[in-house]
Image (cartoon, helix red, strand yellow):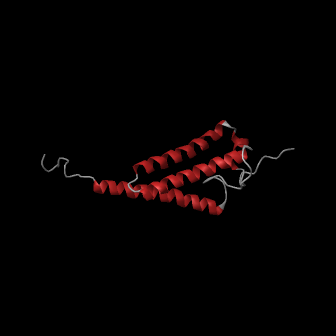
Amino acid sequence: SVNPPLSYSDSFFAATVELLGVISTLPFIFIYLAWFLHCATLAHRATSMANRVIYLAAGSMVTTQSFIHIGVNLGLLPITGLSMPLLGTGGSAFIAFTIIVTMVERLSMLEDEKRLDESDFSSSPSLENA
């Protein structure tokens, strides 16, 4: 008898497929792809090369690790011991990925604030002159 994989181990994706089915796990794949596209968009809008590198590294790291995890669980790649980013257990990995996501979003907010401060509002019509 084959036992289903443990959801709290390094087989998060396999356990999810076992419990929910293949179609129900497609949102996980799309979420990781959306995260990469979000980071790529932020990198495209970034004002400095350092910020571009941070965005692309964060997006690539989370997405690559998730696809390696999925590949291992499908038997396409050798066993690596990587957990599913932000979903699988692994205390230090979860903390690290939470810090990465927080750092990307905070950096994005700072860049947006900087863009707003640098924009020229003096050319827009004033309400006082109306």
Q: Residue furthest top?
A: 23
Where is residue 42 shown, x and y percent of the image?
Answer: 44, 50
Q: Which residue lies furthest to the front in this view?
A: 49
Name the image quarter holding the C terminus.
Answer: top left
Q: Which residue lies furthest to the right in this view?
A: 1
The residue nearer to you, when weighing 128 against 100, is 100
Q: Is residue 76 left or right of residue 36?
A: right
Where is residue 109 shown, x and y percent of the image?
Answer: 40, 56
Q: Is residue 71 visible?
A: yes
Give me the residue at 67% from left, 46% from top.
Answer: 70
Number of disc labels: 0
Q: Is residue 15 visible?
A: no
The residue nearer to you, when weighing 15 against 116, is 116
Q: Which residue lies furthest to the left in this view?
A: 129
Where is residue 94 shown, x and y percent of the image?
Answer: 61, 59
Q: In this view, does 66 lie to the left or right of 119?
A: right
Give me the residue at 61% from left, 44% from top.
Answer: 28
Q: Is residue 115 left or right of residue 89?
A: left
Give me the residue at 87% from left, 44% from top.
Answer: 1
Where is residue 9 shown, x and y percent of the image?
Answer: 72, 55
The residue nearer to you, when weighing 12 against 123, is 123
Give me the residue at 62% from left, 39% from top.
Answer: 26
